[in-house]
Image (cartoon, rainbow, N blue to C red):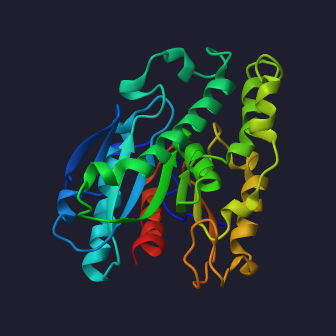
Amino acid sequence: MSTSKSTPEVRHKTDESSLTFGYPTVSVKEVSIVGLECKVYGLEEVQNSDKPLAVLVAAHGRTNSQKNMITFSQGILGIVNDETKNRNSKRDLLIVTLDQRNHGKRISDKVANLSFDENPRHLIDMAAKVYGGAQDIQMIIDFLAAYLFPHGEKKIEEWIITGISLGGHVAWRLLREEPRIKIGIPIIGLPFESFPKYMKPRAESMKIPFDPPTYPPSLLPLLEGDIDHSNYKGKKILTIHGGHDKLVPLDKGLKDIENVMNILNNQENANTHGNARGGDSGKELKGKGEIWIDEFTGHAVSKEMVEKTAQWIWEYGLK
């Protein structure tokens, strides 16, 4: 586990404008996948390249929208493209954003995005948004290439997931359930199996008992069922947290995350005969996991978090 060593001023709010790092704006193409409106960043800049693509899907947080991922995307592409000027990459990078379920242009029930004090179904709604958010991104993986490159002009070779808060929860679920995603950077989010562990104290802090109807028995198998940790094998996961995060505190999911880290960083994870869940036959597939804490940030995104995200994408997705 590593921590940041920067300014001692604690940040509790994301300064979105700072996340561009001063890099210029990039091209944006709007794509509608049967009504799921996505934005694709960086496409024009790589049109004349013959390299295959890596696509980073970046999921926003609760009560936000994909508009809140504009500067994040600009900063990631700027850092990565700077690195590409100095060192050759095997892939070009695109970034895709979308409005999460019941967010942005898709909102239909404002109460469903609120916490327990204003929404007694908060646990149910959050679980449904994570579950549905993962399904939306799986549809993007299935169909984006067909919409962007109907003649097969380019090949998407690698899918990468990142997300903030709610988006971080979605990223964790996809890393467990979607074999086509092998690289992920959840930011201020926790694994799906950690949901009851941090939602219970959130409810109880508002004097709300964490039992039915707040926590319906029908959700027990979904949130507390058996976990197949072998799904994580061979993946490259950097999980980023704020040291002062009181809303989604790392300690509530640390045991679950450490279980994943043990799988990823165990050298026996290497598979010299290929991986039936999507690996290349004959290639050794080793996982890599890291927990990184920005000790001077709460439930927010710092420039340091974005830099670490970009470095991880470069190291495992592009280099």
Q: Is residue 52 above or below residue 219?
A: below
| Residue depicted at 74% across the width and 76% down the height | 266
Q: Is residue 295 above or below residue 111?
A: below
Percent coordinates x, y for residue 126 in the rendering: 62, 30
Quadrant placement of the C terminus: bottom left
Residue 307 sits in which quadrant? bottom left
Of all residues, the one furthest to the front in this rendering is 151
Front-lying residue, 105 or 188: 105
| Residue depicted at 33% across the width and 64% down the height | 93
Q: Is residue 30 visible?
A: yes
Number of on-image labels: 0
Quadrant placement of the N terminus: bottom right
Q: Is residue 298 visible?
A: no
Front-lying residue, 308 or 143: 143
Q: Is residue 109 above or below residue 40?
A: above
Percent coordinates x, y for residue 240 in the rendering: 57, 56
Percent coordinates x, y for residue 135 in the rendering: 53, 41
Q: Is residue 43 left or right of residue 319?
A: left
Front-lying residue, 93 or 164: 93
| Residue depicted at 74% across the width and 49% down the height | 251
Percent coordinates x, y for residue 239 in the rendering: 60, 58
Residue 157 sits in which quadrant? bottom left
Q: Is residue 99 left or right of residue 274?
A: left
| Residue depicted at 58% across the width and 59% down the height | 179
Q: Is residue 141 left or right of residue 271?
A: left
